[in-house]
Structure formats: C-alpha cells, structure tokens
Amino acid sequence: MLVAESNFVEICKKTITICLFFQLAVVPLIIDPFAFDFWYIPKIDSTYVLVLIVLSAAVIVKIAGKIRITLPPFFLCFFLALYAISAIVSTLYSVDRELSIRGDFFRQEGVLTILVYTILPVLFAAFVFTRQQARILLLGLAVCSVLVAAYAIIQYIGFDPVKTAPFFGIRPLPGMQAFGSTLGNANFLGKFLVLTAPLLMAFICISTSWKRNILWALACSISVAALILTETRSSWFGFFIASFIFLITGATVRILKKKLLLSLAGIMLVGLAFISIAAFARGKLPDLQKMITSRTAEAFEIGKLRENSTRFFMWEKAIDHIAMRPLLGYGPDTHVLIMQQYNLEYNRRFNCKVILDRVHNNYLDVALAQGIFGLLAYCGILVSFLMWLWRELKREGNAETRIFLCAIFSGYCGYLVNDFFSFSVVSVSPTFWSLMGLTIALQHIGMCGKDACLDERGAPPLISNG
C-alpha cells in the first residue's frame, strides 16, 4: 500500500514537471488552424488546463506530505494577492460584469485569466525542484523563442505553411503581410522576443564549446532579425534597453566582458545578414532599408508624433475615462466598451478602419480596467520583483546563475519599456508571469549546487569581487 502511494506521488510530481515545461516552452507555439481564433483561445485554454492539472497534482502531493513548497518573496506574494483582489473587486463593480468574467472574445483577459496570471509565478517558484529541471525549462523557452522567430522570418519571405483563418483581426487584409508567427501579431511577436532574446545571449555566454557558441549565436541572430522585421519601434527600443542592461550587468563577470562585446557585435551582423536575405527573397530590400531609417527618424519627431500618432490619441481618451472612475476602474476586459465611442473619430482622423479595444499602453490599460488600486498593485509586483532580482543578482556568486539572472533582469526591463506602447495579450503574458516564478526557483536552488565553486570545465568561478 505504501509503495503504491509512493508511486502515485511520484507520478504527480512528474505530471507537475511536464505541465510546467509545456506551459513555458510549448504553449507559445500552439495554434489551431481549424478554429475560428487559432492563436489566442488555444493558448489561454491550454494554460487553464495546465494550471488546473498542476494545482490538482500539487494538492495530492502536499496531502501526502512529500513536497516542500517554496513561495515567492513576501512582498511579491503580497502584491500578487492585491492584484488578484483588485481584479475580483473591479469585476464586482464592472460596467459589464459578464464581460469581465468571461473576457472579451478577441482578448480573453477577463478576471479568470488575471487570476491565472497571478498563480503562475507561485506555481513555478514552488514546483521547480532541481537544477536539471530549471536548466530544461530555460533551454525549452530558448528553443521555443528561436522556433517562433524562424517561423516569423519564413512568413516574412512570403511562405506560410499554416493558412490563416478568414476572420478580421486574424487574416490580414488584402495587401497586408501576415507576420505574427505563432503569436498572432507583429507587435506581440516583438514583445515576446524582447523578453526572451537575452536568454539566448546568456546561453552563448555559458557555453564552453565553440560549436555551441556558434549555434546559439545563430539562434540569437534569427531572433534579432525577426524582431527588426516586425517594424515595431517599441520592440526595437525595448530590445536596445534590454541589450544595454545585459551588457552592463553581464560585464561584472570580468572574463565574460570581451565575450559579451564580441557576441553582441556578431549577433547584430549575422542578424542583419538574415534580414537582408529575407528582404531580398521577398524583393523588398530597398523598401526595408527605407523603412528602418524612416521609422527610426520618426521616433524622434515628437511634435509630429503627437499630432499623427494613434497612441497619443488613445492615451488622452483613456486618461479622461480613468479620471471618471479612478479607484476601481471599469472592470477587466471592458476596454472595448469604453473605447468604442471613439471608433468613428479615430477612423476619420487617421483614415484607418479599426475597432479600438485597447489603449496601447499596458499601464493605462490596467488603470482603465482595475483603477488606480489595480495599477498600484501591478506596479508593486513589477518593482518588488525587479528589486529582489537586482539584489540577488549582485549577491550571486556562481557565474552561470548570475548570467541567467542578468539575462532575465534585462529582458524584463526591455519588456516593461515595451509595455508603454503595447498591452497584455494571452499569447505572450503567460510567459511573462511564468518566467517570473522560474527566476525565483532558479535563484533558490542555484544552478550548480555544491559544485557552485566550479564552472563547466572545473575552473574557478568567473565572478569578480569588484
């Protein structure tokens, strides 16, 4: 009887491990070409199922007393709980309670999704037990990122092996190029790559084999090329910030300083080569060069941007509405109800027929949906996590773990900068929240355990005391 019970507990633990891997490394790749919405609903439904399985298995293992749970730091747990409470209270006072519960069909970010987001960091922090498990999860996410980027470049060239479903917002309009990879939109693709590209740089840094160095450099170049081809300036800027921070923080590992500089230079050169090849194959090389220079120049023309930018238009309207219901907001995923009254004005002013359902600034989106209380809770999560991560990064004595922490820290900084011009979406946000929990587990268990004083070659650690 005891043997059978022990075997059942081990099965539950393995189930948890497999589910966490699927959540981090497989869910971003999921598409359903036979569905009406084949990008967003399949991903969030998969996340719901995986979270339910992990919670069920965790309860069984905990009851059996065969597990020791590590929770995130206190302040992070505190703000996660506040954010979840804010979503629930905002739903109770929502202008459309049913919509806030089930979520908008095109966005799927109702109160249930927000609650799942707050659970993901806890699950990953609690149920990543071993160094091997952490390595596999990081490797899985890195490989997933490369596959997403490679598929995007294939789409850019003009070949899409998965035909898109004929519905507005998913299938591109005539004359538009489908370029969202498995994430559904070029903006979301850029957002995902800003978060994950520094991980690929970290794998370059920790690899001691020149063959692996080349492979990871090529993988990172593919991601950089795809990110540039998205034509989204917010992602370019976010990636620039992430790369700069990674270079500065990674340079504290003195022996890696030269390697970092050479790697970043090589990545950019090879990435530009991939871009040129893709543009040449599509017959758009001169247009691409013109696009990059013109969009970069426009980013510095603030006066022109204010007059012609769709985002400034939406931000001003959103701020006016936030002032009307500042504390609790209008309810999760009710943005479309608030912004739809400006559709006609928007269409006339910018000569663009769209349905406004987001503000294109995640912080304003949170405030509009959950009020200032929700925004403070959300910012509390971000600040407490980054402060904790920065403190642990400075204290970490193992080179490998420190490089990964640098990559994750820089990726989050770039992602949060990107969020000033983008918004939360179910094809990317689960990765954002899951990686937060994995980072906590990574720091808790370390990457090298009792052999932390040695690197892969048995050499002393590459950490300076300066």
Image (cartoon, rainbow, N blue to C red):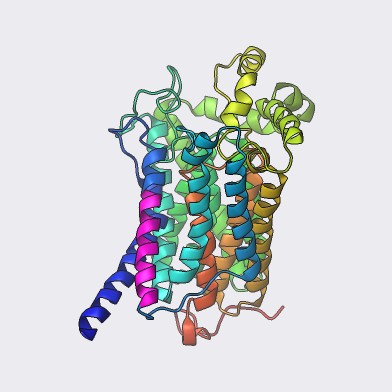
Horizontal relation, residue 426 to residue 379: left or right: left
List x then y, in percent, for residue 66: 37, 80
Residue placed furthest toward the front: 92
List x then y, in percent, for residue 267: 52, 52
Name the magenta segment's main secondary structure: helix
Residue 108 in view in this figure: no
Residue at (27% x, 33% y) in the render: 34
Residue at (45% x, 43% y) in the render: 427
Quarter of the image where the N terminus is located = bottom left
List x then y, in percent, for residue 337: 58, 27
Q: Splitting the image into 4 quarters, where does residue 246 fall?
A: bottom right
Please give the range of residues in magenta: 46-63
- Does the stretch in magenta take in 59? yes
Horizontal relation, residue 344 to residue 51: left or right: right
Residue 441 in view in this figure: yes
- Does the stretch in magenta take in 376? no
Residue at (38% x, 76% y) in the render: 63
Horizontal relation, residue 325 to residue 293: left or right: right
- Looking at the image, residue 66 lies above or below residue 376: below
Quarter of the image where the C terminus is located = bottom right
List x then y, in percent, for residue 309: 69, 25
